[in-house]
Amino acid sequence: MNMSRPAFTVHIFSIYLMGLGISLALFPNLLLSLFSVAQTSEIWIRVVGILAFNIGVFCWYAAASESTAFFRASVYTRTLVLVSFIAFALLGMASPVLILFGLVDFAGAMWTHAALKLEQRRSLPYVRTLI
């Protein structure tokens, strides 16, 4: 599969999201225990897993279709994830370990952002100056 750099970054992120989603949906307490988060029998963690998996599928197809608008939007939304998770931790609403997941999203967002900028620079015509 031949894809642009921005598409590749979102493709990799989609694999992460689908894996995370499957883990949360099928084995939530295993994943929670790896990060020293209290185990739960609540259904919500599995619901979040299904949602993460579905967003991963959206990312997979966006990458396959070279949806630049989606790539740009994902930079903003993945950055918002980190900001939100930091706020949740600071307000005592969640364990600070949640920030680690936000950092993964943010790192992916910055990778996509850099790839978009590189593609943009490459698409500009080369102008030679005589100075």
Image (spheres, grey):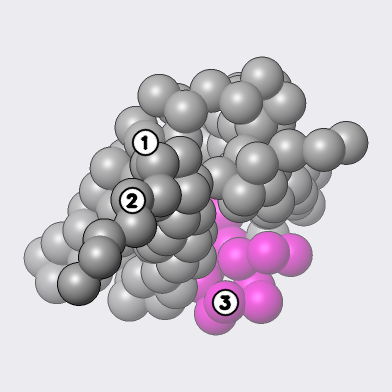
Q: Nearest the camera: 27 or 55?
A: 55
Q: Which disc is residue 127 wearing?
A: 2
Spatial separation of the CA atoms under disc 2 and disc 1:
27 Å
Q: Residue at x 28, y 42 (%)?
A: 76
Mark 3 Cα shell of 10 Å, populated few (<14), some (14-19), many (≥20):
few
Residue 72's tag is 1
Q: Residue furthest front?
A: 130
Q: Nearer the viewer, mark 3 or mark 1?
A: 1
Is the stretch drawn in magenta largely helix, strand or loop? loop
**Given the image, on which type of amino acid does mark 1 rest?**
Arg
Q: Amino acid at mark 2?
A: Val
The mark lying in front, picked from 2 and 3, is 2
Residue behind mark 3: 35
**Vertical position of residue 45 compared to residue 128: above or below:** above
**Image quarter (top left, top right, bottom left or bottom right) of the N terminus:** top right
The magenta stretch is 30-42
- Mark 2 is surrounded, within 10 Å at the Cα level, by few (under 14), some (14 to 19) or many (20 or more) other residues, namely few
Pair 2/1: label in front: 2
Q: Amino acid at mark 3?
A: Phe
* Relative to 71, 22 lies left or right: right
Query: Label 2, label 3: how many angstroms apart (C-alpha)?
Result: 52 Å
Front one among 44 and 19: 19
The answer to whether residue 13 shows anywhere in this view is no
Labels 2 and 3: the sequence-earlier one:
3
Farthest residue toward the left? 91
Question: Which mark sits nearer the N-terminus, 2 or 1?
Answer: 1
